[in-house]
Amino acid sequence: MGVFKRLKNACFFVFLEVRYKKTKLQNFLLFQKDRSMYNVLLYYNFSPVEDPEHFIIRHKAQCRDLGLKGRIYVSEEGLNGTVAGTFEATEAYKELVRGLKGFEDTEFKEDECDTVPFARLIVKIRPEIVSIRSPFPLDPKEGGRHLSPAKWRQVLESDDDFVIIDLRNNYESKVGHFEGAILPDVENFYDFPQWLDDVDIPKEKKVLMYCTGGIRCEKFSVLMKKKGWNDVNQLHGGILNYGKQEGGKYFRGKCFVFDDRLVVPVNPNDEEPISTCEITGKPADTYINCANMECNKLFVCSEEGAIQMEGCCSEECKAHPFKRPFDLENSFAPFRRWYEYFGKEFKEKA
Ligand SMILES: [Zn+2]
């Protein structure tokens, strides 16, 4: 074999080798790109927590050790939390919760994400893990019939005479809800008992109710039964579980969540926004907090609207001295504390 031919062959193999390595590298990068880095958990369990004061100190330290962020409400009636971290951390956390006496059967809703959608870790005591402020006790054991996502869909497709109540706040149902649901115009969950007294739902009607992850139904279904409705049904695991198990059929728009993502998709076959940008009037389903620190209003805003108003809800807010510096990347997430945007002089001014 001539020198030239050997050289040519060698070059060919080097070329093959490089190409092979490049493909492997590309696949690796693609794999990394496809795979979300983090996991978000959402859960609740109405099971007694003895000595919540003591519990939160230990629990917070354990969460911190796992590198988790999020918020956990602790009360004598149970736990309600949403935390995020690496898959290893969330797996360890699930084990930790299920290792607590009375929490062995805790169900977790899970979602992958590319960044941790919380700024901090908050573990705190609340009088209730979901606040309905009822004047009489509501025991979730006396609640409605839990419908699995499949059963819920069957009822929606049946000829039954029913009403569907969206148990979330007005700004949540605005960007997404089940077709035909009643969307109460309330700003807080604890406004629902009053709403129920004012609304006219016949006692013999079949009632279907849903919320994000199921916890609000656990209390409201008890209230409705105590007030005389007999056929009370609640979506087990809420919209998030329904989206995962039934592909979100009959759900229109997106689901509001209380973390940095603000909205998450539910129905991959229907991702059309059902709401409009408050600035441009065009279809949009993304939320923004007004950039004026003294306003912070949560409103539906498109990217175009955000750029136009520099993240503000009005011209007044746009001209306000406490307006946060505009940054499109970080605008579509809940606002942080003032020191994330301003120096010490802000506190003196404010
Ligand atoms: Zn504003």
Image (cartoon, rainbow, N blue to C red):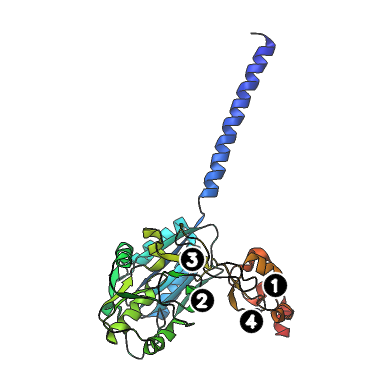
Q: Which amino acid does label 4 sit on?
A: Cys
Quadrant housing the C terminus: bottom right
Q: What residue type is labelled 1?
A: Met
Asked if the residues shown at circle 4 and circle 1 are in contact, with their CB atoms under 8 angstroms apart, the answer is no
Q: Nearer the viewer, residue 136 or 179?
A: 179
Asked if the residues shown at circle 1 and circle 3 are in contact, with their CB atoms under 8 angstroms apart, the answer is no
Residue with the mark numbered 3: 253
Quadrant housing the N terminus: top right
Which of label 2 and label 4 is nearer to you? 2
Residue with the mark numbered 1: 309
First in sequence, mark 4 or 1: give its number.
4
Q: Is mark 3 on a helix, strand or loop?
A: strand
Q: What residue type is labelled 3?
A: Gly
- Disc 2 to disc 4, C-alpha distance: 16 Å
* Mark linked to residue 171: 2
| Quadrant hosting residue 281 | bottom right
- Measured as percent of width and height from the top left, residue 263 is found at 51, 66
- Measured as percent of width and height from the top left, residue 195 is found at 41, 86
First in sequence, mark 2 or 3: give its number.
2
* Mark linked to residue 90: none
Residue with the mark numbered 4: 295
First in sequence, mark 2 or 4: give its number.
2
Q: Can residue 250 be seen in this view?
A: yes
Q: Is mark 2 on a helix, strand or loop?
A: helix
